[in-house]
Amino acid sequence: MNIEHFRNTAQLALGEASPVAVPIGEPVAKVASRGVERDDGVEAGVWECSPGRWRRQIVQQEFCHFIQGRCTFTPDDGEPIEIQAGDALMFPANTTGIWDVQETVRKSYVLIF
């Protein structure tokens, strides 16, 4: 058994930041992460995003817990969800919509393929 331990997630060093895949307007948000993918179809880690707007394209189910920051997620078929540090979300598979990050967010996440 290999246990992955993400210590002090608020301060955990992440990989190099790169622009989001589908930005909307300026500034273009940048994301950085550190995670692990397992053979059983589960990915987990810590993810951070700078302010900006962009489209969510992830097709997997996702559970995430926000460690810091403030943002809004508006699903394509729903009302805006205001999110801040301490909140947790469970996205069903194929949830698409618009992220609007007002204050750099950091979250821990689990993707289920």
Image: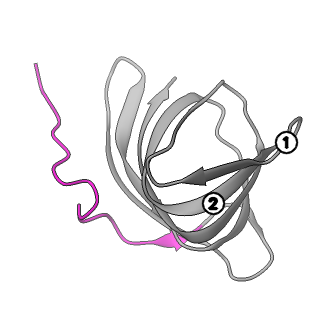
105 left or right of 74 in image:
left
In the picture, the quarter occupied by the N terminus is: top left
Q: From what the image shows, is residue 39 above or below residue 68?
A: above
Q: From what the image shows, is residue 32 above or below residue 37?
A: below
Q: Secondary structure at mark 2?
A: strand
Which span is picked out in magenta?
1-19
Mark 1 sits on what residue? Answer: 79
Q: Residue placed at 57% from the left, 62% from the top?
A: 70
Q: Residue placed at 37% from the left, 71% from the top?
A: 16
- Kind of residue indicated by mark 1: Glu
Q: Residue placed at 39% from the left, 57% from the top?
A: 33
Is residue 16 one of those drawn in magenta? yes
Q: Residues within 10 Å of mark 2 (few under 14, many from 20)?
A: many
The circle drawn on residue 33 is: none
27 left or right of 111 in image:
right
Front residue of this view, candidates 78 and 32: 78
Q: Earlier in the sequence, mark 1 or mark 2?
A: 2
Question: Residue 90 at what x, y percent from top left?
Answer: 57, 29
60 left or right of 43 in image:
right
Mark 2 sits on what residue? Answer: 71
86 left or right of 1 in image:
right
Magenta span dominant secondary structure: loop
Q: CA distance from mark 1 to mark 2?
A: 14 Å
Question: Residue 84 at what x, y percent from top left?
Answer: 54, 55
Q: Residues within 10 Å of mark 1 (few under 14, many from 20)?
A: few
Question: Residue 79 at what x, y percent from top left?
Answer: 85, 42
Toward the bottom, the furthest residue is 27
Is residue 76 one of those drawn in magenta? no
